[in-house]
Image: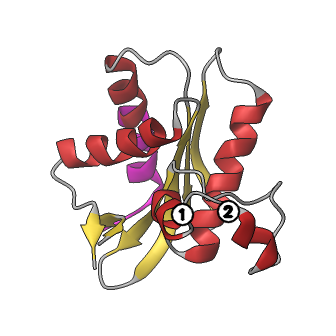
Amino acid sequence: MNTVILLSKVNCELMYQYGCKLHDFINSKGKNKYCIQIRLFDKIIYQYVNDACSMDNERWLNRKANSTLYFGMSTNDLYIKNKGSDENLVQKYGLERSKYTFTPGSIPIVLYEQGIVGCISVSGMLPEEDHGMIVDFFQSLNIQTEME
């Protein structure tokens, strides 16, 4: 199974609303350091960086999003596939570590019967928590988060 956010419709307003609600969801879990980015059709639709985050966290958002969009997979799935190592980024794919990562925290947005149209990324917590917050949030809305 691949981790995805499977939606039957997408638009900028809907993605912005998901961003705001994801922010509230993470806040409700008592987390005080996190940032969120939602990309749709090559545009950043939503971005939030709280006071506890640094420029480094924002760079992680971009690296995670770049990887998800390049490979068409969640960074958690990439992490598992590559046994936790970023070595393949350079050796196999010729990508720069400063722009890509297999660190968990970004999940593709899949438009039903269309394919990948964007991604949702979270950074600032432990990588597994970054990934888990996205999955838990969308599952709380009864939105499918896995597909074969």
Tell me the residue at 69%/44% (across/down): 60
**Residue 66: x %, y % from top left:** 67, 62
Q: Is residue 53 above or below residue 114?
A: above
Asked if residue 111 lies left or right of residue 127, the reply is left
Callout 1 secondary element? loop
Q: Quadrant of the C terminus?
A: bottom left
Q: Amino acid at mark 1?
A: Lys
Q: Nearer the viewer, residue 140 or 91?
A: 91
Q: Is residue 41 visible?
A: no
The residue at the far left in this view is 142
**Residue 135: x %, y % from top left:** 32, 48
Dominant secondary-structure state across the stretch colored magenta: helix
Q: Amino acid at mark 2?
A: Asn
Q: Is residue 29 visible?
A: yes
Q: Is residue 139 above or below residue 23?
A: below
Question: How far apart are the two marked residues, 1 and 2, measured between alpha carbons?
Answer: 19 Å
Asked if residue 125 lies left or right of residue 57, the reply is left
- Which of the two labelled residues, at mark 1 and mark 2, occupies the earlier sequence position? 2
Tell me the residue at 77%/33% (across/down): 56
Q: Is residue 85 above or below residue 128?
A: below
Q: Which residue is denoted by mark 2 in the rendering?
A: 66
Q: How many marks overall?
A: 2
Q: Quadrant of the N terminus?
A: bottom left
Q: Quadrant of residue 41?
A: bottom right
Range drawn in magenta = 7-21
Q: Quadrant of residue 52?
A: top right
Callout 2 secondary element? helix
Q: Which residue is denoted by mark 1 in the rendering?
A: 83
**Residue 37: x %, y % from top left:** 57, 44
